[in-house]
Structures are given as structure tokens and as C-alpha cells.
Amino acid sequence: MTKFIIHYSLHFLIPLLIAYWFFNKNWKTVYLVFLFSMLVDLDHLLANPIFKENRCSINFHPLHSYIACGVYFLGLLFKKTKVIAIALLFHMLTDFVDCYL
């Protein structure tokens, strides 16, 4: 149960706080970007089985791979992609933490 609470707090609550604190004027838009970044989890549908308890997403699913994370880091370099890059990297961090709980 603790793992569930931590995981979903990192997906929903902490991004809300990040959006509000660091992007005060546009916090609602930034929070929506964080929420939409969860679409990256669609790559879970490519796995067989789709869900396996205790499987680490990092470097297992294509959009959670180290190469994908490198692309997300590159997004930090450009103003137009910075927020989505932050959202995707925070998503990866959340899933990484989940691997060790």
C-alpha cells in the first residue's frame, strides 16, 4: 500500500507542487503537461505480459529506455520543449523510484 501511495503521489501530487512553485503564472498548463506526460506509459501495451507485478519499467519499455531518457534530457536545451522534458524526466524518476520500493 505504501508503494502505491508513494508512486501515485509522485505522479499526481508532486507535479502539482512543482507546477505551482516553479511555474506560478502558468501552473495549470504546466500541470496538464505533467499529466499528459503519463501517455508515455502507453509503451507498456507493447510488453508481454502487459502488466507484471514488480517489473521495473526503466530500460524495459521503449519510451522508458536510457536512450529515450537521453532524448528527454536534450529537450531541456530548448525553450519550447523544456516543460515537457521536465515532465518526462520526472516521470522517469518516479518510475525509477518505484523500481526500488
Image: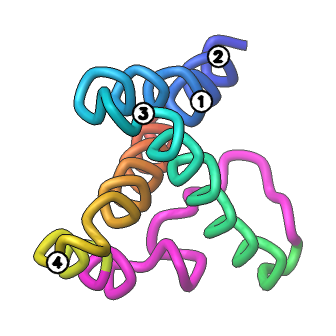
Dot 3 or dot 1: first in sequence order is 1
Q: Residue furthest left?
A: 77
Residue type highlighted by circle 3: Trp
Q: Nearer the viewer, mark 2 or mark 1?
A: 1
Residue 92 horizontal/vertical position (percent): 42, 56
Q: In the visual, does 83 lie left or right of 14?
A: left
Question: Is label 4 in contact with label 1 (beta carbons under 8 Å)?
Answer: no
Label 1 sits on residue:
12
Question: Is label 4 in contact with label 3 (beta carbons under 8 Å)?
Answer: no
| SS class, disc 1 | helix
Residue type highlighted by circle 1: Phe
Label 4 sits on residue:
78
Residue 28 horizontal/vertical position (percent): 52, 35
Cα distance between the residues tagged 3 and 1: 14 Å
Cα distance between the residues tagged 4 and 1: 25 Å
Number of marks? 4
Residue type highlighted by circle 2: Ile
Cα distance between the residues tagged 4 and 3: 19 Å
Q: In the visual, does 76 lie left or right of 97?
A: left
The residue lying at 63 percent from left, 12 percent from top is 2
Label 2 sits on residue:
5
Tell me the magenta residue range.
50-71
| SS class, disc 4 | loop
- Residue 64 forms part of the magenta stretch: yes
Residue 84 quadrant: bottom left
Circle 4 packing at 10 Å, graded few (<14), some (14-19), many (20+), is few
Q: Nearer the viewer, mark 3 or mark 2?
A: 3
Label 3 sits on residue:
27
